Image (spheres, rainbow, N blue to C red):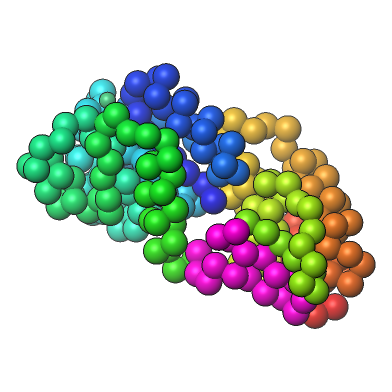
């Protein structure tokens, strides 16, 4: 899952980014409304966190412009003022939810999870490929009902592959969805994680996970 944080308070922005990355999300930060709108148009984001009082362009305007441009990414508005008018204004602009600052990080996480669950792409929460099961709620992976040890990045990568079964995904797409922009070590990191996943899921399922030379990977539902 890839998130965009549009917030001009640097400390808050980077704090949110760090916290969300710790939860396994990949996060990009921008610090004004103009950048927020440009980045927000990128369809590879699964969710946008959008402050209201921003330099260059107000968050509500950004939100409305994104919706006018047919961007359907869920938007969670972060607002400093707890006034009814602001709430209505925010939701009228096409935002999906709002959170009043200051907020607890747990509250932010809960709202994000709720919004991501609404995504058609995040359904169902259990992804199954024969005896290989990935549960996005408990964040566990099991093979023939036996839970395996897996890191958060491996989990996100496997989730992405399972959501794209029988479709080739490029290394760039994987980097986009599982890592973030500031991550520049590039394609090799994907290969290393794929190698680890193959080891952990065992020979049978590893044989379903094919390398597409020069392009990326494909997880097939048969050998
Ligand atoms: Ca602000």
Q: Is residue 10 above or below residue 215?
A: above
Magenta stretch contains residue 133: yes
Number of marks present in the image shown = 0
Q: Nearer the viewer, residue 171 or 7?
A: 7
At x 72%, y 37%, the residue is 186
Q: Is residue 91 left or right of residue 205?
A: left
- 97 left or right, relative to 196: left
- What residue is drawn where x is 69% and y is 53%? 155
Residue 215 higher or lower than 220, as above or below: above
Viewer-proximal residue, 134 or 27? 134
- Answer with left or right where residue 68 lies relative to residue 178: left
Q: Residue at x 63, y 56 (%)?
A: 139
Which residue is rendered at x = 92% and y = 67% of the image? 203
In this rendering, position of residue 53 left or right of residue 111: left
In x, y percent, where is residue 86?
12, 40
Q: Position of residue 148 (x, y in %)?
A: 79, 59
In this view, the residue in front, 7 or 141, is 141
Q: Nearer the viewer, residue 64 or 131?
A: 131
- Magenta segment: 122-138
Res 166 visible:
no
Image x and y of residue 42, in percent? 44, 48
Q: Is residue 185 visible?
A: yes
């Amino acid at each position: 899952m890839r998130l965009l944080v549009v917030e001009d308070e640097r400390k808050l922005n980077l704090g949110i980014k760090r916290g969300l990355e710790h939860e396994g999300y990949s996060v990009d930060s921008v610090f004004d409304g103009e950048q927020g709108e440009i980045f927000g148009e990128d369809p590879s984001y699964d969710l946008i966190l959008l402050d209201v009082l921003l330099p260059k362009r107000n968050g509500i305007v950004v939100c409305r412009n994104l919706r006018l441009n047919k961007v359907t990414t869920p938007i969670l508005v972060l607002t400093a003022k707890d006034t009814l008018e602001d709430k209505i204004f925010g939701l009228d602009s096409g935002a999906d939810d709002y959170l009043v600052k200051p907020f607890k990080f747990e509250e932010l996480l809960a709202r994000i999870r709720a919004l991501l669950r609404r995504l058609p792409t995040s359904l169902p929460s259990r992804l199954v490929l024969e005896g290989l099961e990935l549960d996005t709620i408990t964040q566990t992976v099991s093979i023939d009902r036996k839970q395996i040890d897996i890191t958060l990045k491996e989990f996100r990568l496997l989730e992405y592959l399972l959501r794209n079964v029988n479709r080739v995904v490029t290394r760039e797409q994987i980097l986009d969805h599982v890592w973030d922009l500031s991550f520049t070590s590039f394609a090799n990191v994907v290969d290393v994680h794929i190698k680890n996943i193959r080891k952990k899921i065992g020979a049978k399922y590893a044989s379903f996970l094919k390398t597409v030379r020069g392009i990326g990977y494909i997880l097939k539902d048969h050998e």
